[in-house]
Each structure stands twice: as C-alpha cells, then as structure tokens.
Amino acid sequence: MTRIAIIGAPCIDEVISPDGTCMSTQLGGVLYSYAAMQRLISHASLNVEVIPLTFISIADGDLLEPFFAELSSFNFSFAPKTYEAVSNRVKLLYQSDTERSEYCAGILPELRIQHISTELLETLDGIFINMISGFDISLDTLRYIRAHTHAHIHLDIHAMILGELSHHPEIPRRVGGVNAWREWIRNVDSLQMNELEADWFGVPETTSEVELLHEIRSLAKEHQSPKTAIITRAERGATAFDFTNEQIWNKTPTLRRIRNATGSGDVFGAVYTLSRTLGTSEEQSLWQAEEIAGWNAGLPTLEEILSAPLNLIG
C-alpha cells in the first residue's frame, strides 16, 4: 500500500455579501485537497492510504464529520485533536461576483515535531505540505520531516508570502518575502506557487519569477533539491520546471465554464503529489493536476468533488 500524508489546516469559509451579510458557510482550505485525493483514489481503485497531519477541531465536529465520513481512504488516527481551537475561519468578502477580499483572525495550532511519529514518517511514500495559513509548520519541523523520511515532499507555498493574520477586511495581510526561503525549498522535492507568489517568495533577493527560477535552478544543481518548481497560471494553465531532466513542461487549460475557482490550487497540489508519489512522469503529473484543478473550478462546492462526473479531456 502507498501512504501519503497531507499537512495543512481545514478551513470553514464564511461567504460575506457586500452589505456584510453571511450568505453561507462552506468547507475549505486543505479539505479541497482531501476531496480531490479521495476522488482520484476511488475513481482509479488505487491502493493508497491518506494520512492527515493537522489539528482536527472537536468543536467543529458537526461541520467536519459528515465530510470525513466520505473519505474511505483516509486514516485520521495520526491527526492531533484540539478541544479549544476551531478550524480556521476565513471570511470571504465579495465586492462583486468576481472580486473579493479575505481575512482570517485565528488559526489552528501549528503542527510541531512532537506531533509527528518518526515511525510513521519512515513508512510514507509521499507528503503534501499545503501552507493554508502560512503557519501550518515551521522550518525546523520541515527539516525534521526531511531527515526522517524518503517520501516525495511537495510544498505549496500558498500563504507563506502573507504576513500577520488579519481580523478585519480593511487591514489585509501584507504580502512579503519569506525568511530563509532557500532552506524551505532545499528540504522538499517539488514546490508549487502561483505567479504572484513567485514574484514575492524570494524578496528582496529576487523580485520576479525569472530571477527566482534562476536561483532555484542553482540550488537544484548544487543540492539535488528541489527537483521541480511549478508555476500555476490560472486561466493560462501551468508550467513545470523539471531541473533533474532540464525540461520545461507546459499544460494549457481545457476550455471550461468557471463557476468557483476557490480551492483549485489545493486540488492541483493533491493531484500532483498523488501522481508523482505513484511514479507518474513529470509531464503527465502536471497534465493531471492542471486538468483536474480546472474541472474543480467548474463545480460550485467542495463536496461535489466527491461525486460530480469527472469530465477530463485527453
């Protein structure tokens, strides 16, 4: 059996209308990654066990348990529980149908070394670190994970470029560079970011995607890690820079109706991690991840990932 761990915080998204009314409460954050991985495992009848490594809020049981019950390939026994904290509450404030701001005042506790079993790490084949809050794990914890596993580690830097948490939409989290960014990526096999994140990740040492990729390529040559850097480009698809084979792979998106792009990066990372862990080629893993992330953008809710027709092209 293949074993894959997922690190990253579950979220409860509160959708706020322009007049301040809470229109709906939805599951979000790393739960998009859970749904995507479960769907592919079931769809292809894969012999894969998925192990969440994040705090689970007992207080949010009524919201989370019905969804968790659908995840037949998941083993939650290694996930620490919290009775005090609630899942990350992310408020999505819409100015129009397409424009929104988001803010979050409180997050789940950080996953620390004492929460992770070395015996478990030795059995893992893949690890997806999805930095939902930006504070999901520390660099020291990542170093510890890397030292105790041979698993393929995929990192979505996601909220790492954001600063302190915000309690009010008029005080957004400030975008900035990541301290010790070279150490972060030296301890993973692949990393994922969108174009904004690529411009900011290495600031002030790099201030553009091109500069950052040049530096990552140098690190890859010197340390043999990371092996791949992926830039997701929304409606223009995604690009994988394969430093091991000195290749650049591009995946143009399939033309689809976009209904809700929320969670597409979380789906992308989950699919890519699953594909690479199972030994799928870099080019094909990129294709699968981008295609299914695009399919997700056509679904109105996270839960539909588990049941909607999986219409893929090619």
Image (cartoon, rainbow, N blue to C red):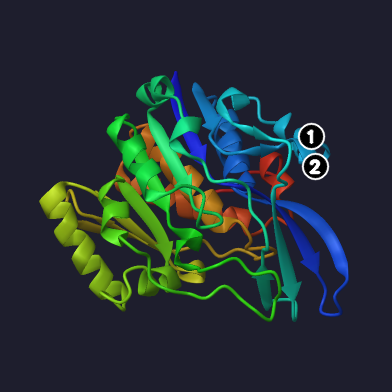
Task: Indicate left or right for 193 with 202 as reference.
Answer: right
**Disc 2 marks which amino acid?**
Leu
Q: Is residue 168 above or below residue 220?
A: below
CA distance separating discs 1 and 2: 7 Å
Q: Quadrant of residue 146 in the image? A: top left
Task: Indicate left or right for 136 with 218 as reference.
Answer: right
User: Which percent across, then down, holds residue 86?
Assistant: 73, 46
Point 43% across, 22% down: residue: 120
For mark 2, what is the residue?
A: 63
Viewer-nearest residue: 223 or 114: 114
Q: Is residue 291 above or below residue 208?
A: above
Point 61% across, 27% down: residue: 76
Point 33% across, 74% down: residue: 203
User: Which percent across, then down, holds residue 256?
Assistant: 60, 63
Circle 2 crowding by C-alpha within 10 Å: few under 14, some 14–19, many from 20: some
Viewer-nearest residue: 99 or 108: 108
User: Which percent across, then down, holds residue 273?
Assistant: 42, 41
Q: Say what secondary structure mark 1 lies in.
A: helix
- Residue 281 seen in this snapshot: yes
The reply to whether discs 1 and 2 touch (Cβ–Cβ < 8 Å) is yes
**Disc 1 marks which amino acid?**
Pro
Circle 1 crowding by C-alpha within 10 Å: few under 14, some 14–19, many from 20: few
Task: Indicate left or right for 173 with 119 as reference.
Answer: right
Q: Say what secondary structure mark 2 lies in.
A: helix
Q: Quadrant of residue 65 in the image? A: top right
Viewer-nearest residue: 234 or 308: 234
Viewer-nearest of discs 1 and 2: 2
User: Which percent across, then down, holds residue 67?
Assistant: 74, 37
Q: How many numbered marks appear? A: 2
Point 53% across, 46% down: residue: 110
For mark 1, what is the residue?
A: 66
